[in-house]
Amino acid sequence: MRHPFQSISPERMPRYLIPLILLTLLSMFILNLLGSSLNTAAAPSGIISFELAGDPAISTAIIDSWDPTSQMIASLSLGLDYLFLFIYSTTIAMGCIWAMNAFISKPSFYLSVGILLAWGQGLAALLDAVENAALLRLLLDGIQSPWPQLAQTCAVIKFALIALGLIYIALGAIMKAVERARR
């Protein structure tokens, strides 16, 4: 199984990856700035606390801790996250394909993991979209099951896929640095 980003030559990959990384970081900064008002005692991590609540009572406590303006900011943040999920998933997927080059001399298992993790970022984006829909439903239509549980399940799997992709990229970067140092 191949990933579409494998059609980009390793020499040209930084030309696309570096702007994507910068766009991802800028988007994260904007979303964090926007969501900073969502940090409350009930939601110490703001929107992430809401994503991971998983229980109607906890979700209610979080929403109740936000004033109407904060609830509107939460809705806006979730709406903007639909754009962000395309940005970060593309960046991490491309990063996984970039990191694969460090594993070329290793058993094919390492290359297969890179391809699977690159494809997994598309799944992470899809899960993020479902999670956002569930959270918006909670904000706009009131708290009821299964929306908190669905949002939590999607968030946990999404965060796991993102973390695995980032770990793979970090390992690839370390291997590339070690290889350069040996030369």
Image (spheres, grey):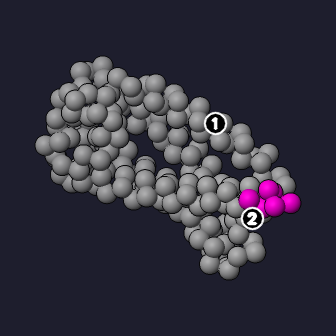
Q: Is residue 24 left or right of residue 138?
A: right
Q: Which residue is mark 2?
A: 101
Residue type at numbered disc 1: Leu
Question: Residue 33, percent across and down?
Answer: 46, 25
Residue type at mark 2: give it.
Asn
Range shown magenta: 178-183
Q: Is residue 181 magenta?
A: yes
Q: Who's the residue at 24% across and 46% down the image?
A: 53
* Along the line of sight, the residue nearer the viewer: 66 or 78: 66
> For the residues marked 2 and 1, what is the alpha-carbon distance in whole angstroms?
23 Å
- The chief SS type of the magenta part is helix
Residue 119 lies, with reference to residue 23, above or below; the image says: below
Q: Which residue lies under the disc numbered 1?
A: 23
Can residue 30 be seen here? The reply is yes
- Residue 180 location, x and y as percent? 81, 57
| Residue 9 appears in the figure | no
Element under disc 2: helix
- In front of the other: 60 or 17: 17
Q: Quadrant of the N terminus?
A: bottom right
Residue at screen point 74% across, 55% down: 177
